[in-house]
Image (cartoon, helix red, strand yellow):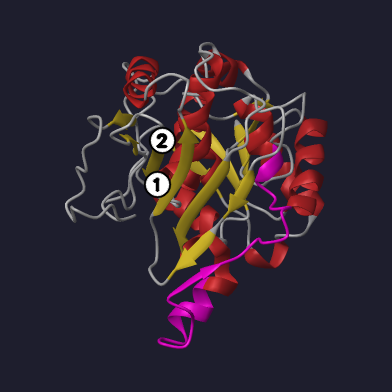
């Protein structure tokens, strides 16, 4: 049995990681008494006993815990934003590129991806790497998430005040959302995209939309073919048929249907004149966007089958 310490297990992501690991046949969870959760010496002892520490903390606290883990020689999986573009950390998106899985498996320090970047990167990275989209192009990324993506405060606003929270609301309109550096860095874009996140009055599920100008460039069907090729062997990434809505709510695409799973669905839609294309990613912000991805990375780091315990339900 491998031992995992979840630092911050009472937060939204920490609770979900714990729920998954409680059913994992190869992992014992090391817990800290809530009264001691800020005691560095107790954390130190738990990290010394753990094979991996999972950090489900705000950024500043995650940096402190990561330094403590490094001091005692404990491997770390950080679910915060703190280390996602750090050169000495491995980015925890196994499907990102060839060799990423092996890098995660061997790493001492792994940063779990953000929910919005997961969808955006799975759409953009292979198309940029193949030279089908220009890295210097202008890209606008539009997205909507369930309110659970906002953590405890937003969850309380929606669930404790039914009917008083907005049905739909855009936010992050200062062009400096915390996920932007991560998206630009790992996609290969040479300029920062415009990112427009929003929240809907539902608990979980996420859609990411990226419109692309294909006039004079590869046809939308060519972009779809490249995504099919890139993810042909991936267990958690499905590329839907070109120009088809496979959602149960068709003719609509909704953020629902992947709740509690570690799966992502990608779609490509092209205009009849071939001049415009829409790239779409659908995932669960609590699953592949957070805790499901964390367990997938833990499996790689600890030598378990990658699909073991990643889903709830």
User: What element does badge 1 sit on?
Assistant: helix
Can residue 149 be seen here?
Answer: yes
Q: Nearer the viewer, residue 52 or 118?
A: 118
Separation of marks 1 and 2 at Cα, in angstroms: 41 Å
Q: Which mark is residue 20?
A: 1
Using the rendered view, name the quadrant where residue 235 is placed: top left
Q: Is residue 9 left or right of residue 281?
A: right
Earlier residue among tags 1 and 2: 1
Q: Tell me the mark number nearer the camera, choosing from 1 and 2.
A: 2
Which residue is at 21% across, 38% downward? Answer: 244
Numbered range of the magenta stretch: 155-181
Magenta residues, dominant SS class: loop
Vertically, is 202 above or below 284?
A: below
Q: Are there few (<14), some (14-19), or many (20+) residues within 10 Å of tag 2? A: some
Q: Position of residue 268 (x, y in %)?
A: 34, 34
Relative horizontal placement of residue 158, taking residue 79 as reference (left or right): left
Residue 207's x, y, as percent?
A: 41, 50
Secondary structure under badge 2? Answer: strand
Residue 228 tag number: none
For the N terminus, the quadrant is top left
User: What residue appears at the point 41 percent right and 47 percent down from the top-left corner?
Assistant: 287
Tell me the tag on residue 276: 2
For residue 49, which quarter of the picture?
Answer: top right
Q: Is residue 225 left or right of residue 3?
A: left
For image coordinates 61% across by 49% down, the residue present is 195
5, above or below 130, in the image: below
Give whichever of 152, 216 is nearer the camera. 216
Q: Is residue 145 magenta?
A: no
């Amino acid at each position: 049995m491998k031992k995992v310490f979840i630092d911050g297990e009472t937060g939204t992501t920490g609770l979900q990681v714990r729920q998954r690991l409680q059913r994992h046949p190869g992992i014992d969870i090391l817990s800290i008494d809530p009264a001691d959760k800020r005691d560095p010496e107790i954390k130190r002892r738990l990290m010394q006993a753990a094979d991996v520490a999972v950090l489900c903390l705000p950024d500043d606290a995650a940096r402190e815990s990561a330094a403590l883990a490094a001091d005692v020689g404990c491997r770390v999986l950080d679910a915060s934003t703190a280390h996602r573009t750090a050169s000495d950390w491995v980015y925890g998106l196994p499907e990102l590129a060839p060799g990423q899985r092996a890098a995660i498996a061997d790493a001492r320090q792994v940063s779990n991806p953000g929910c919005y970047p997961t969808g955006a990167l799975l759409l953009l990275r292979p198309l940029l790497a193949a030279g089908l989209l220009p890295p210097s192009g202008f890209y606008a990324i539009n997205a909507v998430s369930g309110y659970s993506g906002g953590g405890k405060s937003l969850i309380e606003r929606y669930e404790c005040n039914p009917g008083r929270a907005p049905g739909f609301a855009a936010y992050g309109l200062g062009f400096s959302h915390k996920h932007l550096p991560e998206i630009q860095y790992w996609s290969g874009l040479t300029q920062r995209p415009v990112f427009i996140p929003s929240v809907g009055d539902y608990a979980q599920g996420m859609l990411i939309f990226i419109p692309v100008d294909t006039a004079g460039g590869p046809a939308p069907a060519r972009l779809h073919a490249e995504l099919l090729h890139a993810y042909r062997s991936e267990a958690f990434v499905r590329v839907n048929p070109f120009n088809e809505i496979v959602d149960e709510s068709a003719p609509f695409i909704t953020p629902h249907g992947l709740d509690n799973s570690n799966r992502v669905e990608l779609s490509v839609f092209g205009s009849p004149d071939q001049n415009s294309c829409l790239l779409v990613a659908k995932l669960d912000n609590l699953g592949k966007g957070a805790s499901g991805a964390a367990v997938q990375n833990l499996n790689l780091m600890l030598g378990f089958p990658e699909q073991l315990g990643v889903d709830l339900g």
